[in-house]
Image (cartoon, rainbow, N blue to C red):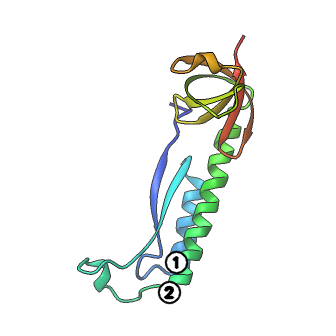
């Protein structure tokens, strides 16, 4: 499934995480074919094993690491979306945008697609020619 969108959850700033370990994690996430990340900054929860660990990281550093990973995730998601420009994808049209000429839906690999001129096609899967991408959002028109 070469077009599969693969995501992962990442915790930033787990107790004891060194700068080197964080750098290696970031490098690994850059190299792996993940499409998106759900990044969670570590937060201490009383009664958990992790709360009892030493070497807790300062909250400001945790926030910074989480921010870096989120930016990386946004870049990867945008690059993945851009790889579909010029292709035709089946898209399930789900909802209007408040504008009569624009609706949105999802491709089979969970890529959000905005479609011009398809208002009458809500709740149907249609072939869409992908004309562009804005970040992680694809834009297209019904295929002729």
- Point 32% across, 85% down: residue: 53
- Mark 2 = which residue? 58
Foreground residue among 42 and 3 = 42
What count of labels does the image hold? 2
Q: Position of residue 78 (x, y in %)?
A: 67, 46
Q: Is residue 131 left or right of residue 115?
A: right
Could you tell me how far apart the alpha carbons at marks 1 and 2 are, in whole angstroms?
A: 6 Å
**Few, some or many C-alpha atoms within 10 Å of disc 1 (few <14, some 14-19, many ≥20)?**
many
Label 2: few (<14), some or many (≥20) within 10 Å? few
- Residues at circles 1 and 2 in contact by the CB criterion of under 8 Å: yes
Secondary structure under badge 2?
loop
Q: Circle 1 sits in a helix, a strand or a loop, which is it?
A: helix
Which quadrant does the C terminus fall into? Answer: top right
Most foreground residue, 59 or 80: 59
- Left/right of residue 8 with respect to residue 24 in the rendered view: left
Q: Residue at x 59, y 54 (%)?
A: 31
Residue linked to disc 1: 62
- Residue 123 versus residue 9 in the image, above or below: above
Residue at the bottom extreme of this rendering: 54
Q: Is residue 90 left or right of residue 131?
A: left
Q: Where does the image place residue 97, in percent across and percent down from the top left?
A: 64, 34
Name the residue at 26% across, 78% down: 49
Residue with the most extreme top position: 144
């Amino acid at each position: 499934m070469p077009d599969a969108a693969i995501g992962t959850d990442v915790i930033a700033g787990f107790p004891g995480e060194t700068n080197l370990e964080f750098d290696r994690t970031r490098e690994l996430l850059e190299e792996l074919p993940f499409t998106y990340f759900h990044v969670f900054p570590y937060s201490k929860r009383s009664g958990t094993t992790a709360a009892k660990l030493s070497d807790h990281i300062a909250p400001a550093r945790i926030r910074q690491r989480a921010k870096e990973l989120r930016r990386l995730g946004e870049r990867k998601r945008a690059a993945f979306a851009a790889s579909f420009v010029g292709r035709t994808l089946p898209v399930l049209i789900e909802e209007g945008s408040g504008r009569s000429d624009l609706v949105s839906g999802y491709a089979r690999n969970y890529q959000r697609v905005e479609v011009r001129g398809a208002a009458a096609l809500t709740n149907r899967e249609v072939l869409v020619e992908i004309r562009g991408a804005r970040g992680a959002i694809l834009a297209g028109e019904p295929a002729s």
